[in-house]
Amino acid sequence: MTRLCQTEGLTEDQSEILKAVRVFVDEQIIPVAQELEHSDTYPQEIIDGLKELGVFGLTIPEEFGGLGESLLTYALVVEEIARGWMSVSGVINTHFIVAYLLMQHGTEEQKQKYLPRMATGEVRGAFSMSEPGLGSDVSAVSTKATKQADGSYSITGQKMWLTNGATSTLVALLVKTDEGAESVYKNMTTFLVEKEAGFGETAQGVTVPGKIDKMGYKGVETTELILENHQIAADQILGGEPGKGFFQMMDGVEVGRVNVAARACGLAWRGFELGVAYAQQRKTFGKVIADHQAVLFRIAEMATKVEVAHNMMVRAARLKDTGRRMDVEAGMAKMVASEYANEVVEDSFRIHGGYGYSKEYEIERLMREVKFMLIGEGTSDIQKMIIGRSLLKDYKLK
Ligand SMILES: Cc1cc2nc3c(=O)[nH]c(=O)nc-3n(C[C@H](O)[C@H](O)[C@H](O)COP(=O)(O)OP(=O)(O)OC[C@H]3O[C@@H](n4cnc5c(N)ncnc54)[C@H](O)[C@@H]3O)c2cc1C
């Protein structure tokens, strides 16, 4: 039953893509998600299937071998995938952001060099801003690229929380450079760092130490990245010019926020499905629990939150597809979708009673996974700062 999360005005192509992904999710992801998640196993077969479906090149233009689809299509695909298993959407998320950065800000050579191989999934992207000492406060980046006499750079520093840190072979890395600008934001540069997949020293001066052990979001690895005098040519600067990294990354984060909103929508949707099914099976005091008004109202509230989150996410994606800035809409969608997903999943957990605490039931996995939605691509506090500041500018007293 798919009454929720319907999107009006989709093209035939979009509807076909979503149908194919939904079948894939129902048949290939949901049946194995619980087992793979509990054993923290990388979902290689699922990833191979997504490659075949063309998901890695979904938004990459056709001239580079992709499907040339919109952010909206991508977000709806992510919602479907996260409904099956949120971790799988994490595998494609950083890849998608790196491809977006290349499409928007890369030089022609960089596009030619990477996008065709990213479209097939041969080159896989990771996105690295965070460090042990910073996440929200990106201006505090301390990993430094120093210009050498021959014009190349040497990068030293420690990065933290790289989703796909080991499986990726191309990292969009935000570092400090000395451009002599007064503003810290203009002294930051994004480098395209190539490395091998795997752990240990994966390129000269680039080490991926190991997996961070997480409470959820398992299967996909999250890692640190240590750079020690990593030598890199100046033509690996995204867009060819230093000093633009902060603005490029913020653009990437904006689409990343729509993507996290979509993941939260998928989790909320699944939480609802599990709750509404269980409520019609479990009996207490002589009737199924869905017939107790408290549970019925919970179901109604959950469904309403699923719909609100879905519609805000869709609106933000559509706005971005028009090429407009949409930091407020992306921030609102991300905040509402993640907070609502957290509430919907918890409501579903409550409906499950004691069984929700058992590892046999899917809802326990969702309970752990949904917490990451509150953190990734900026916490709700950070979204509120962005939304509030922007609105104060718009509504400034004359
Ligand atoms: C599983 C996982 C995967 C991740 N993947 C990636 C990745 O691929 N690439 C990447 O670059 N990063 C990644 N991150 C990092 C993530 O983006 C950061 O964790 C997140 O931005 C929060 O930063 P922080 O952890 O440093 O928290 P902090 O910035 O230290 O914040 C701590 C608390 O203080 C609050 N706070 C901070 N500043 C303010 C303020 N000005 N006003 C009000 N409240 C404030 C926050 O809301 C939060 O509650 C990942 C994180 C996790 C957990």
Image (tube, rainbow, N blue to C red):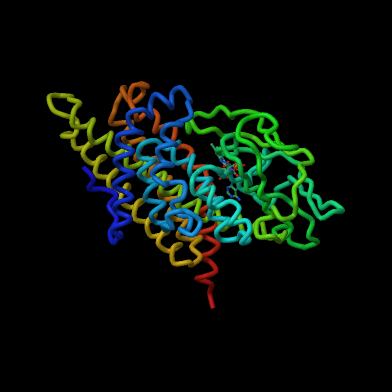
Residue 285 x %, y %: 15, 24
Residue 127 x %, y %: 59, 46
* Image-quadrant location for residue 37: top left
Q: Is 289 in front, or is 7?
A: 7
Pick out the residue farthest to the left: 286
Pick out the residue farthest to the right: 149
Residue 366 x %, y %: 39, 33
Residue 38 x %, y %: 43, 23
Q: Is 74 in front, or is 309?
A: 74
Q: Is residue 387 left or right of residue 202?
A: left
Residue at 46% across, 62% down: 320
Residue at 61% across, 31% down: 198
Q: Assign ligand 1 to one image quadrant.
A: top right
* Image-quadrant location for residue 292: top left
* Image-quadrant location for residue 339: top left
In the rendered image, which quarter contains the N terminus? top left
